[in-house]
Amino acid sequence: MKYGLSIDQIIDLALKEDLGDGDHTSLSTIDENRRGKVALYVKEEGVLAGCDLARQIYYHFDPEISIQMILNDGVKVKPGDIAFFAEGKVISLLSCERLVLNFMQRMSGIATRTNKMTSLLEGTKCKVLDTRKTTPLLRELEKAAVKIGGGENHRFGLYDMIMIKDNHVDFAGGIQKAIEKTKAYLKAKKLDLNIEIEVRSIKELEIVLEVGGVQRVMLDNFTPEKIKEAVAIINGKLETEASGGITLENVRAYADAGVDYISSGALTHHIKSMDLSLKAID
């Protein structure tokens, strides 16, 4: 179960934020019965994301708007490509314009960044994961964009997985106590959640293996050489995840070191939106 906003809720709130009591510019300059057509043009290379969302936005605002999709989410695009045509009342098209662009530009930027990273891991078993470093209230869309770009989703929130990080370990009084308290908590609450724990050294990793009871270990800020050492020690007993300091330049070295997953907050919080444009056409 997810506790975040639904897509319909996100669209509804975003439209209210932008429209207020009306798109007064369009209402004052355009005849209410005027019909027209717009095209979404791509202005730079990347991976397209948000087409399905655009369709939902238009339908949510005005079910009479018709959409002709030319391209689908996940395709690689170049300048000059047309993603779709939208036709209907001009005021409706203009009232939705900025929201469609804002979401598609950001989602396409995330999908593009994710695709760049995943393409560098071809031939390895390693998968790219996102994190919770998302825009508040827009996690559903940003994590969807990661999947469109070829990545996988980590936990959605604080409720669907146990992830014991460094602060939890320190406040709990150490690795062993943190794990033991977690197992007792899950048993008492009758919860079936996987446990992941972050380690900062080989010594901490050895304690995790000795205590047991977790499914995945996050090797935080390890070098690729240390990752290899850790993976050899784990020897398939746990899933492995590398995180911290991983870039497009060094991600292959981490994957080649043998981890199952690489998580990157930069997929959603350090991206450049794709340049897209909605233009009226004859």
Image (spheres, helix red, strand yellow):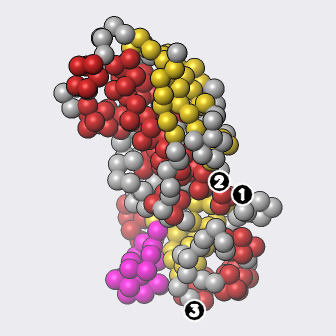
Tell me which amino acid carries mark 1.
Ser
Judge whether 84 appears above or below 31 on screen: below
**Callout 2: 10 Å neighbours few (<14), some, many (20+)?**
many
Determine the residue positioned at 72% across, 82% down.
228
Q: Is residue 138 left or right of residue 111?
A: left
Determine the residue positioned at 38% across, 79% down.
167
Return the residue at label 2: 115
Mark before the other along the chain sequence, 1 or 3? 1
Return the residue at label 3: 203
Judge whether 280 appears above or below 137 on screen: above
Query: In this rendering, does residue 233 appear at all?
Result: no
Q: What stretch is highlighted in magenta?
A: 163-182
Q: Magenta stretch mostly in which secondary structure?
A: helix
Numbered mark located on residue 211 in the image: none
Query: In this rendering, does residue 70 appear at all?
Result: yes
Judge whether 80 appears above or below 193 on screen: above
Return the residue at label 1: 119
Tell me which amino acid carries mark 3.
Lys
Q: Is residue 257 left or right of residue 24?
A: right
Mark before the other along the chain sequence, 3 or 2? 2
User: Residue 165: within the magenta?
Assistant: yes
Marker count (numbered): 3
Q: Nearer the viewer, mark 3 or mark 2?
A: 2
Quadrant in which the N terminus is drawn: top left
Distance CA(mark 1)–CA(mark 3): 33 Å
Q: Which residue lies furthest to the left in this view?
A: 21
Nearer to the camera, 167 or 62: 62
Mark 1 touching mark 2, by CB under 8 A?
Answer: yes
